[in-house]
Amino acid sequence: MTQSDRIEIEETTTLADSWGVLKQSRLRFRRSDGSWQTQVRETYDRGHGAVVLLYNRDKGTVILTRQFRFPAYANGDDCFLIEACAGKLDGNEPEAAVRREAEEETGFTVGAVEKLWQCYMSPGSVTEVLHFFVAPYTADMRTSEGGGHASEGEDIEVLELPLTEAMAMVARGDIRDAKTVMLLQHATISGLCGPVAPTPAPNM
């Protein structure tokens, strides 16, 4: 059976339309045994995005950011998360978006960027597809202090860390952002910052 054979949308209602669009849909879903089941699902659409990990092979370092994330605060967690540079596409191609975000957030004007993959980060409820990149950096590529745009609520701290220390922070639970963990693991396994090293196991 195709998707159209298994899914029938009965009704969709917009619940919120501010920073993103939250919709509730009532649908009929044909199960694997052929029976139909009514389901109600909510989807949050904030547009697609792109993320880039800046790395320096000679120094063995990466550039990360630290910024306030309200959902983490609402969960009662440390709300200043350490992340790779990322942002929404805002109508741009993914490569153009990561170049823009790298300059705005970190102050680095990067040259070549390498596309790795694209993923749904929370497909149970969020429509966003995130495009993943890596890009080399050197000190002379830094053309500003970065920090993001205050008008958009951004107050971003720029961090330069050894990749080994960043991975140790993943293992300790100090870096908990999924996109960042994925990129740091890629950098470690592929040897972007020097010899390939074993990936530390996160604390459970």
Image (tube, helix red, strand yellow):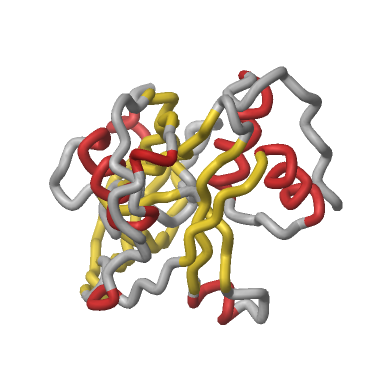
Q: Foreground residue, 30 or 90?
A: 90
Residue 140 place in picture, x, y as percent = 36, 39
Residue nearest the viewer, comparing 107 with 156: 107
Residue 30 makes an appearance in the image: no
* Residue at 29% across, 29% down: 111
For residue 45, which quarter of the picture?
Answer: bottom left
Say which of 87 and 188 sits in front.
188
Q: Is residue 154 left or right of residue 36?
A: left
Q: Eyeballing the image, is 173 above or below 155?
A: above
Residue, x 25% and y 66% (percent of image)?
21
For this orientation, the residue located farthest to the left is 91
The location of residue 193, given as percent across then percent down, is 61, 27
Indicate whether 46 appears above or below 85: below
Q: Quadrant of the N terminus?
A: top left
Classify residue 156 as left or right of residue 151.
Answer: right
- The answer to whether residue 1 is left or right of residue 60 is left
Q: Position of residue 148 (x, y in %)?
A: 32, 65
Q: Give percent across and percent down for residue 112.
A: 31, 25
- Give the total number of marks visible in the rendering: 0
Residue nearest the observer in this picture, 200 or 139? 139
Q: Residue at x 26, y 73 (%)?
A: 152
State whether residue 151 appears in this view. Answer: yes
Please tell me which residue is depicted at 67% across the width and 75% down the height of the picture: 77
Question: Does residue 203 lie above or below 155 as drawn?
Answer: above
Q: Is residue 155 left or right of residue 60?
A: left
Determine the residue located farthest toward the front in the rendered image.
Answer: 140
